[in-house]
Amino acid sequence: MIVFDLACADGHRFEGWFGSSADYAEQLGLGLIACPTCGSDAVTKAPMAPAVPAKSNARTERAPAQASAAAEASQQLSNAPVPPKVQQALAALAKAQAEALKASTWVGDKFAEDARKMHYGERDAAPIHGQATLDEARALIDEGVAVAPLPFPVAPPEKLN
């Protein structure tokens, strides 16, 4: 996994976790990355400072005023620790998605085709999940086909360990 600091056109900063730089570029190109604050899909990588560990023999004592300022600044950063209630909600959502996918069949890039066939009665209805481009998803919605993006990425079965 790779973590990027991202920013939207309105200046909201947030983190994005991706399998690789190529995954980031693909998702950005498909319009799948949006600001969690305002929903804007005008997202770019924000400047990141490298994490350089302190020397093991270095002492890092701070004056009380510096420590207070650092604590205040960390509260304003978008990469501050996730509150426990949010962590619990995300864990519950991930668990619900995993449970739903147990009864669903991976159809890969044939998702739009299979969903459309089920909608028009050309195939038996069954829970499926797979991949669709943004244009394919919009076309399905325009046709009245009930589809929704999964909240968490799903790896194709052949890419699982």
Image (cartoon, rainbow, N blue to C red):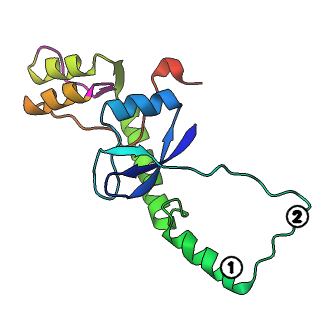
* 6, 155: nearer the viewer: 6
From which residue to which does the magenta span run? 122-133
Q: Would you say residue 132 is visible in this rendering? A: yes
The relative height of residue 86 versus residue 51 in the rendered view (above or below) is below
Where in the figure is residue 19, as x and y percent of width and height? 53, 32
Residue furthest out toward the top: 122
Can you name the residue that lies furthest to the bottom here?
A: 64
Kind of residue indicated by mark 1: Ala
* Distance from the alpha carbon under mark 2 to that under mark 1: 17 Å
Can residue 154 be seen at all in this image of the molecule? no
Q: Earlier in the sequence, mark 2 or mark 1?
A: 2
Q: Amino acid at mark 2?
A: Ala
On screen, residue 154 versus residue 143, left or right, reads right
Location of residue 136 in the rendering, given as x and y in whole percent from the top left corner:
20, 24
Q: Which mark is residue 67?
A: 1
Image coordinates for residue 152, horizontal then vertical, percent? 41, 41
| Residue of label 2 | 58
**Which residue shows up at 7% across the image and 28% down it?**
143
Nearest to the observer: residue 92 or residue 13: 13
Image position, residue 58 (x, y; %): 88, 64
Residue found at x 27% / y 28%: 127
The residue nearer to you, when weighing 147 against 72, is 72
Quarter of the figure with the N terminus: top right
Residue placed at 55% from the left, 63% from the top? 81
Q: Residues within 10 Å of mark 2 (few under 14, many from 20)?
A: few
Residue 155 vertical position relative to residue 87 in the rendered view, above or below? above
Image position of 145 (left or right of 128): left
